Image (spheres, coloured by chain):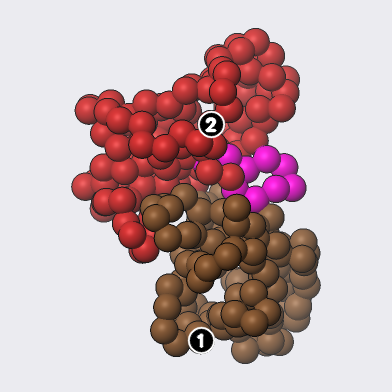
């Protein structure tokens, strides 16, 4: 069965600094990979997704992620963080034939210092 | 176009009571998914329903939990005889079709269930 690991439970960065949130997955084939963001009291919003093709994917709000098969990773990056980016970020994996049944990581809580 | 609506936002129940969580999918969506988020854990898939049918319930606990998505009205996740371990955030998501690539999955804001 597939699994997702987000090793950082909490991350604090200064506004304007760069950000990288780590995500590692375990799956025997090429997975579908997602990053979601959840603001307090809100549902999950899709930031970006990878299905195939270019391993560097661009998302909304200036986020990007890179799929590295050799490292089984799909890290999320942003060159300059804004205070409004403070939220919880979830990495998720879907599999072929799995429909919309996603496996989520435990999340990374991002705090932005002004 | 309203998003996925879940209610109530917060639900408090005493042990042994029943909990009913409602999810109204986005307009035009006929597929509903329920996920549960236990404290300090990621979201875990529970059940996938299409109108009047349960498609995949592989993540549902075998006892006390049930789900339905009737022809008319919202999807209901029902938990009978709740226990403290049921305390969690329950999220609903909807999509217009099964979606081979999960492209059109929209989440609600969740229902926080607290069992006293």
Instruction: Look at the numbered disc 1 and give the secondary structure of its residue.
Output: strand
Using the rendered image of the protein, determine whether residue B36 is visible from the camera's viewpoint. Answer: yes
**Residue at point 62%, 23% (across, down):** B12
B110 or B83, nearer to the observer: B83
**Residue at point 59%, 63% (across, down):** A27
Q: Which residues are magenta?
A: B35-43
Q: Chain of mark 1?
A: A
Q: Quadrant of residue A52?
A: bottom left
Q: How busy is the neighbourhood of tag 1: few (under 14 within 10 Å), some, or many (20 plus)?
A: few
- Whether residue A78 sits left or right of residue B98 in the image: it is right
* Colour applied to chain A: brown
Residue A14: within the magenta?
no
Residue A21 x %, y %: 68, 74
Q: Which residue is mark 1?
A: A56
Q: Quadrant of residue A72?
A: bottom right
Residue A29 x %, y %: 53, 68
User: In the image, which disc is placed on residue B60?
Assistant: 2
- Whether residue A87 sits left or right of residue A31 in the image: it is right
**Residue at point 46%, 74% (across, down):** A50
Residue B27 x %, y %: 24, 46
* Colour applied to chain B: red
Q: Chain of mark 2?
A: B
């Amino acid at each position: 069965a597939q699994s997702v690991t987000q090793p950082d439970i909490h991350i604090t960065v200064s506004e304007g600094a760069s950000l990288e949130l780590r995500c590692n997955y375990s799956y025997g084939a090429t997975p579908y990979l997602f990053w979601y963001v959840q603001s307090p009291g809100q549902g999950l919003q899709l930031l970006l997704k990878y299905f195939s093709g270019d391993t560097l994917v661009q998302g909304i709000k200036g986020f990007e992620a890179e799929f590295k098969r050799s490292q089984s990773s799909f890290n999320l990056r942003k060159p300059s963080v804004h205070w409004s980016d403070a939220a919880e970020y979830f990495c998720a994996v879907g599999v072929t034939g799995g429909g919309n049944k996603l496996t989520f990581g435990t999340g990374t809580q991002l705090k932005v210092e002004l | 176009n309203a998003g996925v609506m879940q209610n109530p936002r917060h639900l408090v129940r005493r042990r042994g009571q029943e909990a009913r969580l409602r999810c109204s999918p986005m307009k035009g969506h006929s597929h509903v998914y329920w996920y549960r988020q236990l404290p300090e854990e990621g979201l875990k898939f529970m059940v996938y329903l299409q109108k009047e049918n349960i498609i995949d319930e592989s993540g549902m606990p075998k006892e006390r939990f049930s789900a339905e998505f009737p022809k008319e009205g919202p999807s209901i996740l029902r938990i009978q005889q709740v226990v403290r371990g049921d305390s969690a955030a329950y999220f609903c998501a909807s999509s217009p079709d099964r979606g081979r690539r999960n492209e059109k999955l929209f989440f609600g804001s969740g229902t926080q269930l607290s069992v006293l």
